[in-house]
Amino acid sequence: MKVLVCGGAGYIGSHMVRRLLGYGHDVVVFDNLSTGHKKAVSNVPLVVGDLLDAEALRRLFAGRRFDAVMHFCALSLVGESVRDPYQYYVNNVAGTLNLLRSMFTAEVSRLVFSSTAAVFGNPRARFIDELHPTCPINPYGASKLMVERVLADAARAYGLRTVALRYFNAAGADPAGDIGESHEPETHLIPNVLRSALGLGKGLKVFGNDYATADGTCVRDYVHVNDLADAHLAALDFMEGREGAHAFNLGNGQGFTVLQVIEAARRVTGKPIEFEYATRREGDPAVLVASGQKARDQLAWTPKYDSIESIIDTAWRWHRAVRY
Ligand code: UDP
């Protein structure tokens, strides 16, 4: 297939590109390089542009035919979204609408959309399945839920086929160690823990130790970035046989507190990894753990990285030899 990967120079997108190439697909990457890296996609055509730029989109689709689009472009930091919601709604919602309209004009009728566990807000069950109410508690989650609603309407009105994949906490890196997570500033837990193991960064902070969890720190479900990429491939197959807008939760179904992640990283790295407690981060739910049952049943997707140590180990390989 010919696949357009929007946001393909970013963390999850670049792992997706590698997976697609590995399966013999043709790939074009569209990315504004705001958080992505040219070096992460050195072996595929890269069109540098922004979803908010109508002319850039026109040029992207002109003279190219795509069988499907994978859409990873987004601002994705909970805290930042609380501080600057306009930026999140413009980028994540208006940007996606521009892409959808370009796809409509170009008659591209398959989309895999990167959504998030943040569409659910505070969980009302131990494992979050697809029937769990969506009630986001921050603008980031709200912006992704708005797009999911647009996709449902587009399926009905225009016959667009879509799969929204709600990632829980994407983590790890390709075991080759040459692509990985690289944000500036870095806000995610595992990269910050590993940077601290390397003596980099300003010192690790744990945001909040007064949550109603086993040790007072937040619980998250960490899922390997290559497992996420595999779910996208399965979604392409899934859309061949089915009309409509579909959504799947992607996680390992296991929750780890921040302290458990630090403990696992100590085991993997053999480093002490000191930290300090800090106040809670705005917009953080206490617990987010997926039920991956629907993805297992309907996408035949089973995460291969099912231990937190194996995920951290691949991230550690990347962080010891960061190339961008
Ligand atoms: N966290 C932390 N210190 C950090 C980064 C994150 O204590 O330096 C916590 C954060 O408050 C949350 C969890 O780790 O409870 C996962 O945060 P991350 O930003 O990695 O992912 P998110 O759950 O926001 O998507």
Image (tube, rainbow, N blue to C red):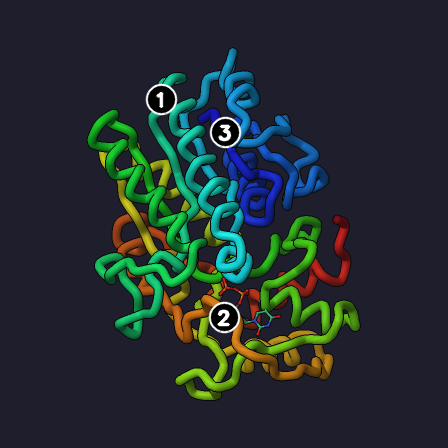
Residue type at the position of mark 1: Phe
- Alpha-carbon distance for marks 2 and 1? 41 Å
Look at the numbered disc 3 and give the secondary structure of its residue: strand
- Alpha-carbon distance for marks 3 and 2? 32 Å
Q: Residue at x 72, y 73 (%)?
A: 196
Residue highlighted by disc 3: 4
How far from the left and from the top, in percent, is residue 129? 27, 62
Q: How many marks?
A: 3
Query: How many neighbours does mark 3 have within 10 angstroms: few (below 14), some (14-19), or many (20 or more)?
Result: many
Going from the N terminus, do you reach mark 3 or mark 2 first? Answer: 3
Q: Give the quadrant of residue 234.
A: top left
Which quadrant of the rendered structure holds the N terminus?
A: top left
Mark 2 and mark 1 residues within 8 Å of each other at the beta carbon: no
Going from the N terminus, do you reach mark 3 or mark 1 first? Answer: 3
- Alpha-carbon distance for marks 3 and 1? 14 Å
Q: Residue at x 31, y 53 (%)?
A: 295
**For the residues carrying marks 3 and 1, which lies nearer the camera in this image?**
1
Q: Work out whether residue 120 or residue 114 is closer to the camera in this orientation and state it.
A: 120
Look at the numbered disc 2 and give the secondary structure of its residue: loop
Q: Is residue 257 visible?
A: yes
Residue highlighted by disc 2: 307
Q: Give the quadrant of residue 288.
A: bottom left
Residue highlighted by disc 1: 104
310 versus 48 height, above or below: below
Residue type at the position of mark 2: Ser
Q: Residue at x 53, y 26 (%)?
A: 26
